[in-house]
Image (spheres, rainbow, N blue to C red):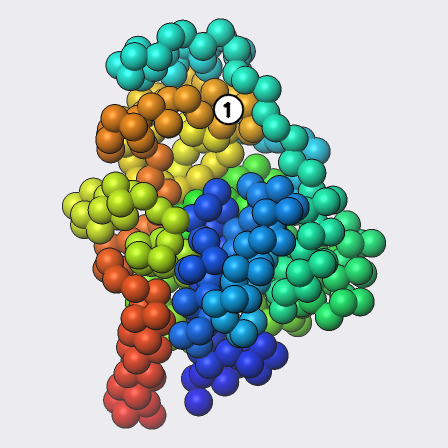
Amino acid sequence: MWTSTPLTERFGCRYPIVQGPMGGGASPPELVAAVSNAGGLGSLGCYHLEPAAILDAAADIRRRTDRPFALNLWIPREREDGESSEPSRALARLQPYREELGLPPLLEPPAPTVQDFERQFEAVLEVQPAVFSFVFGLLPEPMAAEARRRGIAMIGVATTVDEAEALEAGGVDLVCASGFEAGGHRGSFLRPAEKSLTGTLSLVPQVVSAVRVPVLAAGGIADGRGVAAALALGASAAQIGTAFLMCRESGASDLHRAALAARARARRTTLTRAYTGRLARMLANRATEDLAQPPAETLPYPLQNEATRELRYAAARAGRTDLLPFYGGQSAPLAALGSAGDLVAALAAETGAVFKRLGSERG
Ligand SMILES: Cc1cc2nc3c(=O)[nH]c(=O)nc-3n(C[C@H](O)[C@H](O)[C@H](O)COP(=O)(O)O)c2cc1C
């Protein structure tokens, strides 16, 4: 049976379907629990939460489901890659949008709040979820040892085969191979994200051949054809973000969901550092197009994120869909608005139908 994979067997889920963690509030407890209840593995993106809020969110998930789920954090990075720039020039590039939105000039980016990764990780240990997943690097060995001691399975995100090998050497239980079709930030950590762009169809089988641990395929999967393809490439599950972002339980705004569902617009995504300073895939808009014109002028993360914060909030208040960062992957046009439970059921039915058709045609 296609539903029987190392992932479903290890965690006791019905389907090899993982709802990708989406930080910044995009994957709230409602979504995580709905996916886990429907037979997939839900994941809470919680890099943006204080430790106490991680505990609260996990308790909320547990009130809604007794099924396994994942918590996800961003590994802090020592050095940011990307376009470094004179702050004044980067800020000047944002000024026309601020003016349009009635905001005064920004002379320097506000000081970022520092992420307390160690305390966030302690909260994860306290929650003791079935899975802890992380992105943007390797988990320091003492932390990995502690997770292992508590029986928490670890998933690390790789955007290249080298990163997958490094994650395996670091002791992860599963590797998530993320192709460049994926929505959200590129999790690259060995080389700059721009130099780590491999598509899912090429990346997944190479990672499957390179590591012994089970592999999740992420990036561009939004229907049962994609799930079946991921399994055919040797993955133990498909990790899906954008299609779940379009579900009503996600934390996406109505404007964001509508933009992803507007097929003509959703056909045009782009990889950009414009909003946060880290390379991310989102729907193309005026700002991503303008800021893509040379010379590249963005501050390194998290400064660019701080520099665009007021602008993003003002654009949201004004309903300015031409200036809001609508994160999403290349396969948004394959997905539809609906509920997470219905999406899991549809993905499972479609995947089963694909294997049945291939079996009878080719078997
Ligand atoms: C809005 C958004 C936020 C995301 N945040 C995270 C995150 O915090 N941590 C993470 O590991 N992956 C994150 N991802 C990646 C997803 O978990 C998933 O791997 C990816 O969306 C899969 O590709 P797809 O969008 O084509 O389905 C995010 C994706 C999106 C669209």
273 over 252 or under it: above or below: above
In the foreground, 124 or 230: 124
- Alpha-carbon neighbours of circle 1 within 10 Å: few (<14), some, or many (≥20)? many
Q: Position of residue 164 (x, y in %)?
A: 62, 58
In the foreground, 356 or 97: 97
Q: Kindly identify the residue that appears in the image at 60 percent across and 72 percent down.
A: 214
Q: Position of residue 88 (x, y in %)?
A: 49, 8
In the foreground, 331 or 129: 129
173 over 200 or under it: above or below: below
Q: Kindly identify the residue that appears in the image at 72 percent across and 58 percent down.
A: 125
Dot 1 falls on a residue whose secondary structure is helix
- Mark 1 lies within 8 Å of ligand 1 (Cβ measured): no
Q: Position of residue 136 (x, y in %)?
A: 61, 45
75 sits to left or right of 150: left
Amino acid at pointer 1: Glu
Q: Kindly identify the residue that appears in the image at 58 percent across and 60 percent down.
A: 59
137 sits to left or right of 270: right
Q: Is residue 13 visible?
A: yes
19 sits to left or right of 315: right
Q: Which residue is mark 1?
A: 306
Q: Is residue 216 visible?
A: no
107 over 286 or under it: above or below: above
In the foreground, 14 or 231: 14
Quarter containing the N terminus: bottom left
Quarter containing the C terminus: bottom left
Q: How many marks?
A: 1
Q: Position of residue 120 (x, y in %)?
A: 68, 47
Q: Kindly identify the residue that appears in the image at 28 percent across and 92 percent down.
A: 360
